[in-house]
Image (cartoon, grey):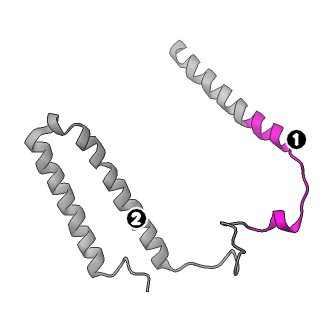
Amino acid sequence: MTEYVPVLLFLLVAIGFAGGTIGLSSLIVPRRRNAVKNSSYECGVEPVGDALQRFTVKFYLVAVLFILFDIEAVFLYPWAVTFRRLGLYGLIEMALFIVILFVGYVYLLRKRALEWD
């Protein structure tokens, strides 16, 4: 039970720091509201249209596919670090992994899932 005391103490300090910082910032921040401050800002370009516009499903599909392939690419780093220790078995496994990724990529290209239209 005593081995959990440092973890509990760290958790209490983290919660206290987060709450204290938010509380302190809400007390000392100046509140001068105006139209420029309340407008949305992105790269210095004036906003066009409504901020609550709907996006097509294609946008979300491409975003999810990007995340999927990005996460799968992350698996290449630990493999590269331990490549010598894994030997031929590791090479074959990674080749199979990349082949499966490539088949999925070709499938997406054939279904035209990555085209914006």
| Residue at x 30% of width, y 75% of height | 108
Question: Where residue 16 appears, x then y in whole percent?
Answer: 72, 30
**Between disc 2 and disc 1, whose residue precedes?**
1
Amino acid, disc 1: Leu
* The quarter of the displayed image where residue 72 is located: bottom left
Amino acid, disc 2: Phe
Residue 27's disc is 1
* The quarter of the displayed image where residue 37 is located: bottom right
Magenta region: 19-40
Can you say whether 84 is above or below 57 in the image?
Answer: above
* The quarter of the displayed image where residue 107 is located: bottom left
Question: Where residue 114 appears, x then y in whole percent?
Answer: 37, 76
Residue 66's disc is 2
Is residue 18 magenta-colored?
no
As drawn, is 11 to the left or to the right of 40? left
Is residue 35 magenta-colored?
yes
- Single out the residue that lies furthest toward the bottom: 117
Alpha carbon separation for disc pair 2 and 1: 41 Å
Most common secondary structure along the magenta stretch: helix
- Tell me the quadrant of the picture where the C terminus can be found: bottom left
| Residue at x 11% of width, y 39% of height | 87
Can you say whether 73 is above or below 89 in the image?
Answer: below
Question: Where residue 25 appears, x then y in whole percent?
Answer: 81, 41
Can you say whether 6 is above or below 103 in the image?
Answer: above
| Residue at x 48% of width, y 75% of height | 59
Q: Residues within 10 Å of mark 2 (few under 14, many from 20)?
A: few
Q: Are marks 2 and 1 in contact (CB under 8 Å)?
A: no
